[in-house]
Image (tube, rainbow, N blue to C red):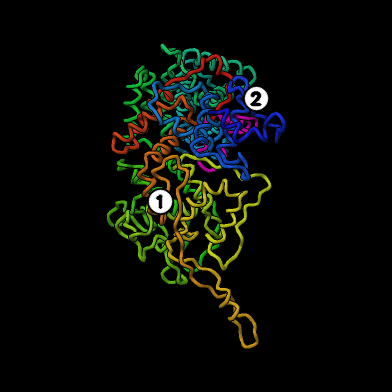
Amino acid sequence: MFKPFLTAHCVRCHGPEKQSGDFRVDDLTGDPAKDADRLLAIREQIRAGLMPPGRETRPDPADVRAIIAWTTVRTGGLAGRQPGQGNLIPHELLFGKPAPTAAATPGRLWRLSPDGYLGFLSDLGKNKALPGIVQPFTLEPERGIKDFAGLYTIDEPSTEILLRNAELIVEGQTARQNGVREFVVLMDPASPPTRAQLEAAVAQQFKMALGRTPGADDVTRFLGLYERCLKVSDSPGAVKTMLQAVLLRTDAMFRSELGKGTDAGGRRLLAPDELAAALSLALGDRREAGIMLAAQKGELATREQAAVHVRRLLDDPKFDKTRILKFFREYFDYANALTVFKDKPKTFVHEPRQLVADTDRLVLHIVAADKDVFRQLLTTEVSFVNYAVGKNKQTNQDEGKPGVVLNPNNNKGQQGIEETYGLDRWPAEQPAKLPDNSRLGILMQPSWLVAYSTNFDNDPVRRGRWVRDRLLGGSVPELPIGVAAQVPNDPHRTFRERLTVTRDARCWKCHSKMDELGLPFEQFDHFGRFRTTETVLDLEATEKNVDKKGKSLGPVTREAVLNTAGTIADSGDAKLDGPVKDPRAMIRKLADSERCRQVFVRHAFRFYLGRNETLADAKTLQDADRAYVESGGSFKALLVSLLTSDAFLYRSVPVASTTTTPGGSR
C-alpha cells in the first residue's frame, strides 16, 4: 500500500524529475536501516496534514491512518523524546489488538525534580528551615507533563549551586543548636573523633540523604576522604567536607535505574534500593522510610513484594502522596490559571489562586472516592466553591469556611467568588451541587477555563487542542515560524464569528483539529462564568448615541445569542465523530469513550514512567487499562498496574552501557 500511496499523492512533486524541498520518495525501499529519517519525515508531514498540500486531492482518512501505522511499525515504533510527542504513536497500534509480551525500560539515571530536591532538603533538615538554600533544578516550561527522565542533567551552574547548598546544609547540621547529634559531637577541634563516631556520622548522613545504610566500601571511602582532608584542615573541617560529599553523591541527586540480576529474557530487575527509591519518588517527593528498610532487609525483590508496598503507600494517610495531585495538575493544566493576567473586574472577585485550590480539592475528593475516576473528573456536577479549612475556636476542630471573604462594609458592590460558579451565596455543604445544565467536571471549572484563556478573551483554539491531545490522543503541529496568530479585534462580532479567520485554507489544516472542539466552551466567559449571551458592540446604536451637538456619548452594547455547537471529527473512533450541541453534550460523549479513557492511561504512563510510550509498551498500557476497568475505575488499581509493570520494574540495557547516560529529572 505504501508505494501506491506515494505514487498517487507524492511522487509528482518528490520524484525523479522534481524534488520539492530537496526531498525524494520514489526511490524509497521501506528498509528502516536505509530510509528511517525519510520515513519518519513522511509520517510527520502526513500526520500533521501538511502533505499533500492544500491544493492537491486529499487522501482518504483511512489510507492516511494506514500509512502512519505502517511507517511507525517500520521505524521501530519509537516515540518522540520530548513531552508532547507521545501521541505520535497511533493509538490503534497500542490498543488495537492484544499485545503478547511486555517491554522493559532502557537503563537510566533520573535526576531529582525541583520538588524532589525540596523533599531531599526536608529529610536532611528534619523539616527545619535551611536558610540560604537555592533551588538548583528546573523543568521544561511547556504545559503538560514535563518531568521526563531523558531531558535533564546537572550542568556546571547547577553543580556550583549544589556545592554551595551542601556547605550550608552541613553548617546547619553541625550547629550547636538544632544540629544533628551525631555530627555536633564531632565539632570540637580539641577532641578528634573516633573511628566509631565517624562511622556513625557517615551512617546517619546516608540515612537522611539516601534512605539507607552505607556499605562497607562506602564507609571506607568516606573515612579515607576524612583522612585526606585532615592533612590540610582541622578535624571539624574534615568532618564537614566528608558529610558534604555524601550529599553530592550521584545516587543522592539522581534516581539510579540501571538494574541488577539478568532474568531469562536478558532484562535486569531494578535492585531493591533502586526500586525502593523509584516507588517512593513515583508517588511522593521523599524516599519513604518503610520501603527503604524493606529493600535493605531483602523484602523488595519480586513483583508481588513491590505490589504490597505500592498498595501500602497508597493507603497510608501519613505518606504524603504529592505526585498524585501533581499528575492531575499537569494532565489538566488548570493550575496555569495562576499565570494568566487579567484586569481586576469591577463587579465580582477574580482570585485564581482560590479557583485552583477549589479544583485541587475537587480532584482529591474524586480520587479519594476512587470509583469511575476518569469519568467523574469529566462529568461531576459538584464542586468545591471558595472553600478553605480553618480551626473553629469554640470546638478546636477543623471545619470549612470561605476562602476569600469580602469586606462587608466596603465591598464596592462586588459579588464574591461564589458568583463565578453561578451561586448567589457561599454553600455550607461542600462539595456543592452546581446549577443545573451549567457546568460539568474539571473542563468547566473556572480554573481550567481561565488557564485556557487570554488576558481579555477566551481561547477556543488552545482549549480544542487540549481535547485533541489529552482526550482523543491526536496531535497538532506547532504554529509555523513567521505566522502571526491573530483574531480580528471586531468588538461588534462574537468571538466565534471573529475566529472564522482560521477557515483560510492555509490555516484550516491544523485548525480543523482544534476549533470545533474548543468552540463549545464559548458557553463561558474568559473568567469562567456561565453565560447564554455574549456582549458585543452595537454599531447602529453607538452611532446614534450622541448629544445635541453630535458628540459621541460612548459605545452601546447588545447581547448576542451564543452558538455553543461544535463537532468531533477525525477522532479515530467513528462512534465519537459528529456534531455536539454544547460543551456538556461533548464532554459526556468523550467521558463515555473507551478511546478517551485509554488516552488518559497513556498520559498516566508518561507521568509515572518518565518517558513517552513506544509500541513495545502496548501490553503495559493494555494491562493498566484492564486493571482500571475491572476495578470499577480505580485510579489506585491503575497505579498499582503501572508501578508493578515490566516497564517500571525491568531495565533492558546492560549496566556498563548506561553509566555515562545523561540523567533525567525526578
Element under label 2? Answer: loop
Compare marks 1 and 2 and give the one earlier in the sequence.
Answer: 2
The answer to whether residue 286 is visible is no
Q: Callout 2, which amino acid?
A: Asp
| 176 is higher (above) or lower (below) than 344 | above
User: x, y (%) of residue 658?
Assistant: 55, 18
Q: Nearer the viewer, mark 1 or mark 2?
A: 2
User: x, y (%) of residue 617?
Assistant: 44, 26
Residue occupied by mark 1: 586
Element under label 1? Answer: helix
Reply yes or no: does residue 585 show up in magenta: no
The residue shown at (53%, 19%) is: 192
Q: Quadrant of residue 332?
A: top left
Magenta stretch: give its range.
138-166
- Residue situated furthest left in the rendering: 395
The residue shown at (53%, 68%) is: 536
- In the image, 392 versus 267, the foreground residue is 267
**Pointers 1 and 2 in contact (C-beta within 8 Å):** no
The residue shown at (50%, 21%) is: 106
User: x, y (%) of residue 190?
Assistant: 55, 22
Q: Quadrant of residue 300?
A: top left
- Return the mark for residue 27: 2
- In the image, 97 versus 152, the foreground residue is 97
Q: Callout 1, which amino acid?
A: Met
